[in-house]
């Protein structure tokens, strides 16, 4: 029993650090590049994706003994599509401005491979506890990665930091007027997304390599 | 038949259950969603036709047109909801026309998916140059300094296409909807 719980905690932590979907597994990249142009967008996308992966893992895990192998992809997709639609409607109802900014990327969570990957690799074979730990870990890992990229891109590209707050965005931080001409506009455009992602993944790999070296030594 | 049912009963059941779940969510949230969209529209109308107290919603030429009156019931202007192709996806805006239809009182973009930081500046202060413009001629967009007698609009730096697409939608309102307004006065 204790071992079971230890494994759950490890599964949760792995989703955030060693097995981070964006920075380590490099899965589900298109929303990463598109919605990290501001911190607000990044956080809301992370929250929506976390909701979907948690519900998807929960349902898949509860029904795992009933799902026949040849219909499993169908059932995963059905579940994910349903919860993404619910998330999309909830955003349009309660966070209208942000949902307009995220545009088509909320419905596109359906095809985010990270979510169907967790269902296939973890939820179909494990109990509810492990599946939920995995889902929350992956979801939080995703959100953290998006937030890191969002902070960098928004600060350098727009000079602001915005947070989602109900119907309006809350400007947490705004660099002075003097920054305006020094804005690096490319950071809020697709090339800037690739540049930032490349640098952040590079740094992540460095950290991981050093930790592994440290462990071996 | 038995094989079909034994293989697919779970998928079919889940399909039905999820459909009910979605229907329930839709029913409970659609009120708020429509409210949000209407609120955005109303704010835009207030911006393009200042001083209005009452509106009457009409459908003219396939577009939603709001006949705006002041407290005394005098016709103040028209607010036309129009949409058209943008650089990324559809742009929806509200164009304000004066009571006689001769002048554009303002333009407010209420929905767009243009490039953040560039194209989506059409929702910002750039739109101020649409205030009190000549509605009898079509608009053109220039990268140089605009001249009012040529009915020109200055493009957003780095977002010429988005600026042009907004002008296209306003031109469509001028050529297609404006002539029809007379009979609704």
Image (cartoon, coloured by chain):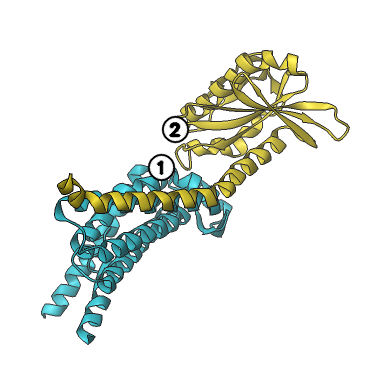
Chain colours: A cyan, B yellow
Q: Position of residue A182 (x, y in %)?
A: 47, 48
Q: Is residue B72 left or right of residue A98?
A: right
Q: In the image shown, does B124 or A6 lie closer to the viewer? A: A6
Check disc 2 and report the residue beneath it: B89
Point out the image quarter for the C terminus of chain A.
Answer: bottom left
Q: Is residue B2 left or right of residue B165?
A: left
Q: Are marks 1 and 2 on the same chain?
A: no
Q: Position of residue B90 (x, y in %)?
A: 48, 31
Q: CA distance from mark 1 to mark 2?
A: 10 Å
Q: Position of residue A102 (x, y in %)?
A: 44, 47
Q: Is residue B18 left or right of residue B33?
A: left
Point out the image quarter for the N terminus of chain A.
Answer: bottom left
Q: Report the residue at 66% width, 19% height from top.
A: B148
Tell me the chain of label 2.
B
Secondary structure found at label 1: helix
Q: How many marks?
A: 2
Q: Is residue B117 left or right of residue A70?
A: right
Q: Mark yes or no: residue A37 visible.
A: no
Q: Position of residue A42 (x, y in %)?
A: 42, 55
On screen, residue B100 above or below A52: above
On screen, residue A51 above or below A17: above
Query: Dividing the picture into quarters, in which one does residue A114 lie?
Result: bottom left
Q: In the image shown, does B71 or B135 lie closer to the viewer? A: B71
Tell me the chain of label 1.
A
On screen, residue B34 above or below B176: below
Neighbour tally class for label 1: few under 14, some 14-19, many 20 plus, Cα within 10 Å = few
Q: Are marks 1 and 2 in contact (CB under 8 Å)?
A: yes
Check disc 1 and report the residue beneath it: A104
Q: Given the current orientation, which residue lies at the most extreme front position? A: B2
Neighbour tally class for label 2: few under 14, some 14-19, many 20 plus, Cα within 10 Å = few
């Amino acid at each position: 029993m204790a071992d079971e719980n230890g494994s759950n905690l490890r599964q949760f932590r792995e989703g955030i650090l060693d097995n981070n979907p964006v920075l380590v597994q490099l899965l589900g990249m298109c929303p990463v590049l598109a919605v990290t142009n501001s911190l607000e967008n990044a956080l809301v996308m992370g929250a929506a994706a976390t909701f979907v992966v948690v519900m998807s893992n929960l349902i898949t895990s509860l029904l795992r003994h009933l799902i026949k192998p040849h219909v499993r992809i169908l059932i995963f997709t059905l579940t994910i599509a349903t919860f993404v639609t619910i998330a999309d409607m909830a955003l349009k109802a309660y966070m209208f401005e942000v949902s307009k900014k995220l545009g088509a990327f909320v419905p596109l969570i359906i095809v985010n491979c990270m979510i169907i990957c967790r269902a296939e690799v973890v939820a179909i074979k494990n109990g509810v506890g492990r599946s939920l730990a995995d889902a929350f870990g992956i979801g939080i890992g995703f959100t953290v990665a998006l937030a890191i990229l969002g902070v960098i891109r928004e600060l350098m590209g727009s000079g602001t930091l915005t947070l989602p707050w109900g119907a309006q965005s809350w400007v947490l931080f705004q660099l002075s007027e003097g920054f305006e001409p020094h804005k690096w506009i490319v950071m809020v455009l697709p090339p800037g997304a690739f540049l930032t992602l490349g640098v952040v993944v590079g740094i992540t790999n460095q950290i991981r390599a050093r930790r592994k070296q440290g462990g071996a030594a | 038949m038995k094989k079909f049912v034994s293989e697919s009963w779970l998928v079919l059941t889940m399909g039905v259950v999820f459909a009910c779940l979605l229907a329930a969510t839709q029913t409970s949230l659609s009120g708020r969603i429509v409210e949000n969209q209407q609120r955005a529209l109303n704010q835009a109308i207030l911006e393009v036709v200042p001083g209005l107290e009452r509106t009457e919603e009409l459908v003219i030429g396939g577009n939603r047109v709001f006949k705006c009156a002041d407290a005394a019931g005098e016709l103040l202007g028209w607010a036309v909801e129009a949409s058209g192709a943008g650089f990324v996806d559809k742009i929806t805006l509200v164009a304000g026309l004066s009571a006689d239809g001769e002048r554009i009182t303002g333009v407010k973009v209420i929905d767009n998916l243009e490039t953040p930081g560039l194209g989506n500046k059409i929702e910002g202060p750039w739109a101020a140059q649409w205030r009190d413009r000549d509605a009898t001629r079509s608009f053109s967009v220039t990268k140089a300094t605009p001249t009012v007698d040529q009915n020109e609009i200055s493009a957003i730096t780095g977002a010429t296409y988005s600026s042009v697409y907004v002008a296209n939608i306003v031109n469509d309102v001028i050529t297609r909807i404006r002539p029809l307004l007379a009979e609704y006065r």
